[in-house]
Image: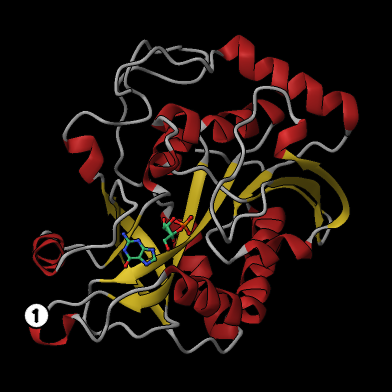
Amino acid sequence: MLHAENEYTYERITEIKDFIKSKCDIDPKVGIICGTGLGSIGELITDAFILDYKNIPYFPISTVEGHKGRLILGYIKTVPVICMQGRFHYYEGYSLSKCVMPVRLMKLLGVTHLIASNAAGGLNQDFKIGDIMLQKDHVNVMGFSGNGPLVGLNDLRFGPRFFSMVNAYDVDLLESAKKIAEELGLKNIKEGVYTCVGGPTYETVAEVRALRSMGIDAAGMSTVHEVTTARHCGMRCFAFSLITNICPIDYSTAVESEIHSNDVIEVAMSKDKDLKLFVERIVQFIGKNDLNSVK
Ligand SMILES: O=P(O)(O)O[C@H]1O[C@H](CO)[C@@H](O)[C@H]1O
Ligand SMILES: Nc1nc2[nH]cnc2c(=O)[nH]1
């Protein structure tokens, strides 16, 4: 699968874009990707136009729990948005280029800013369940072995062959998000480095130790390739992880802290009120300050 030809050419994604445009005349500026159990962020959207993935030509379908499989266009406080209520993961059997196709679709629809959310395990042992980790950076461990969303022929209409990933997580958005969290009185805000593993297995103790020694604070199975693709096509990115579990770094406690996907979904859903307010305010901020200043 690694070097299979990317079926999602510029022309194919343009076809999908034209299909959506033929159904809905909203021009989204902010793209939102809901993580596992975080689909309620989509409830913020007014004048919502909803498309099930299964009804969009060439779209994959969501196969995991906690992902509804719907694309929503509409407004958050007058800012036009597009929201994926359900993302695609590598472990579902989708190539990384397939997983990130919706990011490119967002670009073709006019999106300039991406907000990606995810459920993640805390590797940093100072983290607590329910913390919101604002992503300041990532380590692309899958990319180390050449498994990335941009492997293959490069289409310059999306972006350049080589590009920098410094400032992948937009510093201005990150700082503004911190201020917003403070204004909202959110106490459990952390900042850190995220990584995406292939999954679907959670980490062994040895893997937790290895990832931690690389300076990584949280592990998931998404987001890195989405942000990479968004940066390739010039979007400004903000991402956060809801820490749904703490990854065991000691063999003595590993068994009792075993992770179950139901717990991940439950913790994520229990934070929906805070996260909806948080995302709403970030989108508003982008709408007021940032829409015309794409870097
Ligand atoms: O990254 P999101 O989609 O939030 O989901 C995270 O939660 C699931 C594991 O419970 C994995 O899919 C992992 O990536
Ligand atoms: N890789 C990984 N993904 C997660 N998603 C939610 N929790 C975890 C975790 O502990 N590890």
Image region (quadrant) for ligand 1: bottom left
Q: Is 168 or 17 nearer to us in this picture?
A: 17
Measured along the vertical axis of the image, is residue 283 above or below residue 139? below
User: In the displayed structure, does residue 280 sit left or right of residue 127?
Assistant: right
Measured along the vertical axis of the image, is residue 125 above or below residue 175? below
Horizontal and vertical percent position of residue 97: 44, 27
Horizontal and vertical percent position of residue 221: 37, 52
Residue 274 appears in which quarter of the rendering?
A: bottom right
Horizontal and vertical percent position of residue 217: 25, 68
Residue 247 appears in which quarter of the rendering?
A: bottom left
Residue on which disc 1 sits: 251
- Residue in the picture at 35% in, 86% down: 128
- Residue in the picture at 29% in, 33% down: 164
Measured along the vertical axis of the image, is residue 160 above or below residue 104? above
Q: Is 293 or 256 nearer to us in this picture?
A: 256
The coloring applied to the image is: secondary structure
User: In the displayed structure, does residue 165 sit left or right of residue 102?
Assistant: left
Measured along the vertical axis of the image, is residue 254 above or below residue 113? below
Residue 245 appears in which quarter of the rendering?
A: bottom left
Horizontal and vertical percent position of residue 260: 39, 72
Q: Is 79 or 123 nearer to us in this picture?
A: 123
Q: Is mark 1 within 8 Å of ligand 2?
A: no
- Residue in the picture at 67% in, 47% down: 69
Crowding at label 1, few (<14), some or many (≥20) Cα neighbours within 10 Å? few
User: The residue tagged with tag 1: helix, strand or loop?
Assistant: helix
Q: Quadrant of the N terminus?
A: top left
- Residue in the picture at 72% in, 35% down: 54
The kind of residue tagged 1 is Tyr
Give the tally of numbered discs.
1
